[in-house]
Structure formats: C-alpha cells, structure tokens
Image: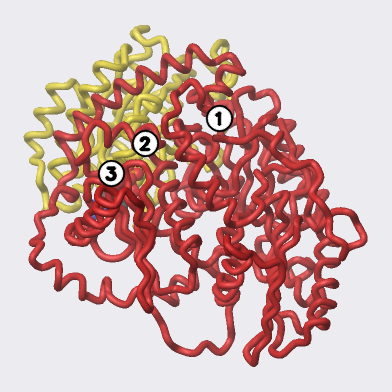
Amino acid sequence: MKVVEAKIVVLGSQGVGKTSLVVRYIGKMFSKHISPTIGASFFTCNINVDDARVKLQVWDTAGQERFRSMAPMYYRNANAALLVYDITNASSFAAIKGWVKELQSNVPEPMVLALVGNKCDLESCRAVSNNEATQYATSIGAAYCETSALHDQGIDQVFLSTATALLSLSSTNLVSSMRSYDSVDGDERLPFGNPTEEMATHIGKVELPAWSDDRVAHGETQRTMCC
Amino acid sequence: MASTSKDVPTSPSGHDNTDDDLEPGASYDSILNPTDSFEEFATEMNTSLERSRDLTKKSSTISEIQSEIGECSKELKETKSSDNLQNKDEAISASTSNSNLDENGEDTDNEDDYLKSPELVNKEKHVFILSSAGKPIYSRYGNEDKLAGVCGVIQALVSVVEEQNRDILRSIITKDCKAVFLVKGPLILVAVSKSNESETQLVLQLTYAFNQIVSVLTLTQLNRIFEQRRNYDLRRLLSGAERLIDNLLIFMEKDPAFLLGAVRCLPLPEKVRENITNAIISTCHKIRDLVFAILIAGNQLITLVRMKKYTLHPSDIHLLFNLVRSSESFKTAESWTPICLPKFDATGFLHGHVSYISEDCQACLLLLTVQRDAFYPLSQAKHTISDKLRRSNCLTAINDALNRSKDLPTTNPLKHIGIPEIRHFMYKCKSTAQLFTSDPICLDRLQDYRQRHKEGGDVVKKKVEKLSDIDYVRNYREFCSKMHCACSPAKLIFRSNSLDTVLAWITNGFELYVTFDPLMEKDQAIRAVDRLLRWIKNEEKRIFIMNAPTF
Ligand SMILES: Nc1nc2c(ncn2[C@@H]2O[C@H](COP(=O)(O)OP(=O)(O)OP(=O)(O)O)[C@@H](O)[C@H]2O)c(=O)[nH]1
Ligand SMILES: [Mg+2]
C-alpha cells in the first residue's frame, strides 16, 4: 500500500472555527465550548484514498493576533494549507489574502491550498458571497468549499479532496518535504527520514472504525484521533 | 534575569523549636529562587524587569543557553528573519484589522453615565491598564472602550506629577479607597481598591499583571511597539489574553501563594514524586535544548526538572499555573506555543510543548525549550513519560492527591494534627519558596467561589457565618503587611479577640500564620504552634519538594 505522510496547517482569523472544524473531522463531534487555541494544536489522522493512505499531521493554529508572528514556525514545511474564514465576517475573508501572500513568499515548495468558508449554517448573516470566494479560490489555485462544523457539512470533502491532491502532488516528486513509501499493512515502516519525526505518527490512539461517505464517489477514510 | 543556583543560600539557619537543624521544608538545594520576604519578592520583581529593559539579545538567558548548546549562530539568524516577518505582519494586519476592535466610536459624552452603571460601581477592586499615551488597554470591569475619559485623567495625573514635580505618583488614599499607580515601561497600571490589601500588595498585583502582558508579548516586543508608535492600540495584540489577566487577578486575591511569594506543591509520597522525577529525567536527559520540564496539577507543582544552573522564580511558575488554568484548549490536543517567563528572560520566548498527561489524569506537563523545532522529539518524550507514569502507578497517586482521598494525611491536615483549636494555618518555607496551607484552595473550589460571586467583585457587607479558606487568607493580609512593613517589621504578632485568635510568626527560615479559636492564651497558642511545626517537619517529604533535580 502506498503511504504518504504530509503536514497540513490550518490558518485563519480568530474565532472562524478552525478548531471546531478539525475536532469535528477528527473527533467526530462539535462542542459549543471550544476555547481559543493557544499557539497551535497538533492532531494526526489517516485518510485512505483508493488504495493509498495519507497520514496527515494537522497543525491547527491560533488566530489570535499575538500569535500571528509565530505563524512561520507552524507553516514551515507544510504541504497543504486550509485557509479558513467565516462567511459572516468579511474581514476574516480579507485576512486570507494576507495569508496567501505570506505563504507564497515563504514556502518554497508547492502546496495544496483549500479555501474554506465556515459557518455556512448562518446563511442569513452571510457577508461573503459564494461567487466572490469561488473566484478568489480559482485565482490562487485553491479548492473552495463551504462548511459548517456545527452541522457537519462539507468537512469530509475538504479533507478528502486535500488528501487526494496531496497524493497526486507526492507522485510528481516536486516536494522533498513529503515522505512517501510502500507498506504491506499500511503501518509505519519508514525506509528513510528523521527518526524523531517517525515517532510522531505513533500518537494516534483511538482508531475509529472505517466508514464511507456516500456523498463522495471514491475514497474510504479511516481516522485516528490524537489524545 | 534568571538567577542561577549559586544564589541559593546553602545553609538556611534553623530555629530552635524543632529538634532537627532545618526548619520544616528546608533543603540545601532549591528548584525555585528563594524568596526571603514578601517585600524583597515585591521589589525584586520590579527591579529585575527594569534592568532587563535595555538588555540586548546577547545577554538574554535564552541566548546564553542557545550558545551553550551550540545553537547560537543558527538561532540568532532565525530570530532575525522572523523579526523582519513580524514587521511585515504588522503591516498586513494593520490593513485588515479586526472590525470588532475598531469600533470605539462610542460617544464620550455618555461616559459619565457609564461610570455610574452597575458594571462599574461598587466593585471591590478595579484594575486599569493604559499606554503612557493614555490609550485604554485593559479594564477589569466594564468595557475599556468607554473608559477613554478615565484613562485620560489617569495619564494626566501621572504625567503632571512626573513632569512638573519631577516625582512619581505612587498612590492616592481616601477614606475608603486606595488608588495605586505603577508606571512600567510604556504602560501605566492602576488599582483602585476598597479591600484591606496594602499598597505594596497592590503594587505587587499590578506587577504581576504587567508580567502577564510581558509573558504573552515579551518585553522586547512590548517596548519596540511603543517605540515605533506611541499611539499604538495594544488591545489588538492582547485580544484573547484579557482572560489571562482577568483570571490572574482573581487568582491573586484568593490564593495565599501570591501573598507569600511561594509555590504550592501537590502532596505526594516521597517515593512517588521520585519516580515521576526519574521518569522525566530518564526520558529527557538526552534532549539538549530542554530547559525545564514541569508537571503541575490544580495550581500545584508536582515536579520540576531543570537544566543545570537555571532555577525558576515563583512568579514565573504562578504565570504558568495561570496559563494552564485559563486555557481549556490544552485539553483538546498537544499544543506548541511560545511562552515568555518574565523573570527567567523577559526578552524572549521559550517554546512550550503543553499537554495533559493522559485523559484520566488532570496533570499538565510543560516541556520548555529554546529550540523552536523541537516539537516532535518533545511530543515523543511526553508519550514515553506518560506511559512510564502509568506503569509505575504514579497517575493513580496523582489522582488520589488531586481528589483529596480521605486516606491521605495531607487531605485534612487539621484533623490529622489533632489540635482542635487550630482553625486554619499557612506555612511558607523561605529557602525553597514553597508553601503549605491547612486547606488547599483547589481548582474547583476557586471556580465555585467565582460562581457564587458571579456579579463579580462587588463589595459585600453581609456577615459570614462560616469562614472559607479564602476568608482566612483575606484576614492574614493585614498581618502579612504588618510583619513586612518596611519601617518597623514585626517578628511575631499575637492577636486575640472574641472572633478568633491569630498568630503570625517570622523566623529566618519560615513564615507561619495560624488562626485559632477566639480568646486563646498566648502560651497555649505557642504550644500548639510547636506541635504544628513538628507535624509539618514530619510530613515535609510529602508536602514539599526537597531536592532540585536536573536533567
Ligand atoms: N454557527 C456556527 N458556529 C461555529 C461553527 N464553527 C465554529 N463555530 C463557533 O465559532 C466559535 C469559534 O470556534 P473555534 O473553533 O474556537 O475557532 P478558531 O478558529 O479555532 O479560533 P482560534 O483558535 O481562537 O483561532 C465557537 O464559539 C464555535 O462554536 C459553525 O460551523 N457554525
Ligand atoms: Mg482554535
């Protein structure tokens, strides 16, 4: 089985729902009482796409302004970025442009980008039109998706399409920071790589049962949760 | 600046009431910087930060460590590049700044009415923080947007005294209220209090609030921001950190650890603590850039392992307690966050791997390093440590102590000591800066207390039937400030009346405050204290950390 290890960073303004999104996907739940992230939180999850497995190291960053200058530490060597804004908050959308500029000038290797408009359950308060966002996503070569962490809408697609894009990126050999290898059982058997980072993939503990999503034609994901 | 273990006095002098040469809890080696007295603690907290103001990167403790482990040139370069980035970020975010913070278009005409609103009136203690240009940064109660007028007045008062009288405004005292001022770097901090806290105690609290801000920004960044733009609105950078200041202020009012400048340890059997410490050392001793590994639970220290030469100041540990207690998000996942410890090195960030040791044990492990890329090895170390602790049953022992299991002598010390006249006590060992009280203020009860006083900090004039631990501590404040009064410090105070009897006693080695039943005789009280000290000595290995482990 082909296994790809990739690092994905979740960026966006304070309170747009980055943690809610990640926790919804990895922990399969939503809590109204999620508190602001401090620095960045680290999660891992495995996504199976066709007969390959993508092992994701997810860095959920803090949107608070005081952590803004720390961002390079978190997106360094990332292979994908989820750029999250809140569809009811126009300035959170404007902030994405700053992030994109910064990534473009600071990350030398190609990156999978996904623009995510979260809180789409709050349609009545919408401040950023679907059209505007789609256009912008196209202009930066990003996938675009609207999600609701509250109602669990669109989140699986975001992760699945990102994983799929990471797989194809890994087969182009354009990216040196992403590791891929063959494995009999899909478990770690790293032929190369830094031994300390290898261990990081042991973190996942709770293996949720494999599940399939009928809204997506292909791909079966299996997730692990970090605790 | 951080002081080194050389500063630790090697032989604290004993007192003659116990049969051993050392007072309870004293040891020759300390993980914490010893704090001799509250005053010293307070002044030291002030001065050392002042000194570090003009420090260049070269003399910072963090750079010192980096150069010692040979990371110097690389790190310095990285720091520089991120500084550049930071400036750029500031430019970017200035143009896209948060809308909710920019709406300070409130009518100032309404401010007079606002000042009379229940949000602000009748509070026991206000705290205001503003920039030296008079811009509001933080108000404990109400909305600082609407307090621009008050801040203007404060700024005017401070600067008039400074410029016209070439003096410093320290306090304004009225019949029922004290206003205490502290100018630190580019900030002005003010406490307006109706409580029984002394001026020094209030200044100390303001210093803590300032250190809390330094802890999230570093002093370097704070100074630079205001050097570049005197009119900067710091609220944008502090957004989300107000909670830390809110919680710190509550914490300081309730927890005697602040009153005494000491740290409380989670009582554990000596062997268990040793196992925990060894698990950390054996896992981490090869990680070269790790400066501190700290395990804490419920505002209590379980163990602290440090790089040789470096110790921590109690106030830095208090800020870590406050951070962990205020940040629910550490419970969701492993975190990697910059942390500045103002007394250790106010000029730079340490990087912290922060995580709870396991889902079934609410102890939080902080691994603090000077190396910004160290997350993965530290994450691995954390998992190894938590496995080791589980296998050696240490997690169970920690949980027992946290849940205050009935079998433990330290859970209800008064009952265990068996001196019925003693209602409450607190003891501080000076040489190790650790404290023990008869009735630990645990996390949940602090929370309860806040719930009960939801309206928050209003002055209440009702008579309390049964005193809580927090009320005892409130009472001690006055004794504490009399004992430490700069002009005529007391060694022993004995006060007996129809409500209660309080004995406060300071020796070279310890500070002790005891509340007895009313109308106790002096020699009866002294005999009881003697027994109490003997009990503490007996249990010292359980209630204090008696060694100073290094990696
Ligand atoms: N209605 C609605 N609310 C949401 C949604 N996602 C998150 N929220 C709420 O938005 C708030 C912020 O969510 P977080 O997940 O903490 O946001 P964040 O981006 O991680 O914030 P920082 O960590 O501070 O950067 C919380 O109160 C959530 O309950 C959503 O899809 N719909
Ligand atoms: Mg978050």
Q: The red chain is which one?
A: B
Report the chain holding disc 2: A
Is the residue at mark 2 in contact range of ligand 1, meaning its CB lies under 8 Å from it? Answer: yes
Residue A43 in view of the camera:
no
Q: Which residue lies furthest to the bottom in this view?
A: B498
Is the residue at mark 1 in contact range of ligand 1, meaning its CB lies under 8 Å from it? Answer: no
Q: Nearest the camera: B334 or A217?
A: B334
Question: Where residue A40 sits: x, y (%)?
Answer: 41, 37
Q: How far apart are marks 1 and 3 (CA)?
A: 26 Å
Q: Which residue lies furthest to the right in this view?
A: B19
Question: Where residue A50 sits: x, y (%)?
Answer: 38, 24
Marks 2,3: beta carbons within 8 A: no
Is the residue at mark 3 in contact range of ligand 1, meaning its CB lies under 8 Å from it? Answer: yes
In the depicted structure, whether residue A73 falls above or below residue A178: below
Q: Which residue position holds label 2?
A: A61
Q: Which residue position holds label 3?
A: A14
